[in-house]
Amino acid sequence: MHNTMQRRIQPELLGMADAEAMTGRSRWSWRRDCYSGAVASVKIGRRLFVPVSEVRRVIAENTRPRRAEAGADTQQGRSVGTA
């Protein structure tokens, strides 16, 4: 009964390796952006952290919209990319 009442604590900060794993972006790119001020960061001792909200912001800002379905352009007899 006690185990079901425990809450799972979600991290608010990610280390560089975790930010890299979450996005596929190198830890050195994260560090560069943290030190340049492009990304908010937290320095605790020798470690550098990025808030989870900041990682999500970077993902959202760099997400491209989905392409229109290919069938929509070919339904009227036109093919995409031809004159």
Image (cartoon, rainbow, N blue to C red):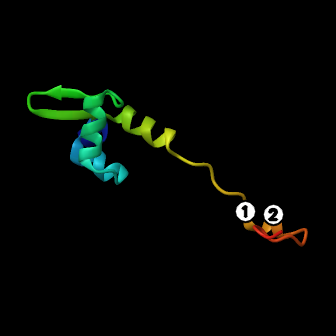
Question: Residue lying farthest left?
Answer: 45
At a point 44% along the width and 35% down the height, the residue shown is 57
Q: Secondary structure at mark 1?
A: loop
Quadrant containing the N terminus in the rendered view: top left
Under mark 2, the amino acid is Ala
Question: Residue lying farthest front?
Answer: 83
Pick the front one: 50 or 7:
50
On screen, residue 37 versus residue 58, left or right, reads: left
Whether residue 79 is visible, yes or no, is: yes
Q: Position of residue 76 (x, y in %)?
A: 91, 68
Under mark 1, the amino acid is Glu
Q: Are marks 2 and 1 in contact (CB under 8 Å)?
A: yes
Q: Is residue 72 above or below residue 62?
A: below
Q: Secondary structure at mark 2?
A: helix
Residue corresponding to mark 2: 72
Residue corresponding to mark 1: 69
At a point 57% along the width and 48% down the height, the residue shown is 64
Tell me which corner region of the image, top left, top right, bottom left or bottom right, holds residue 71: bottom right
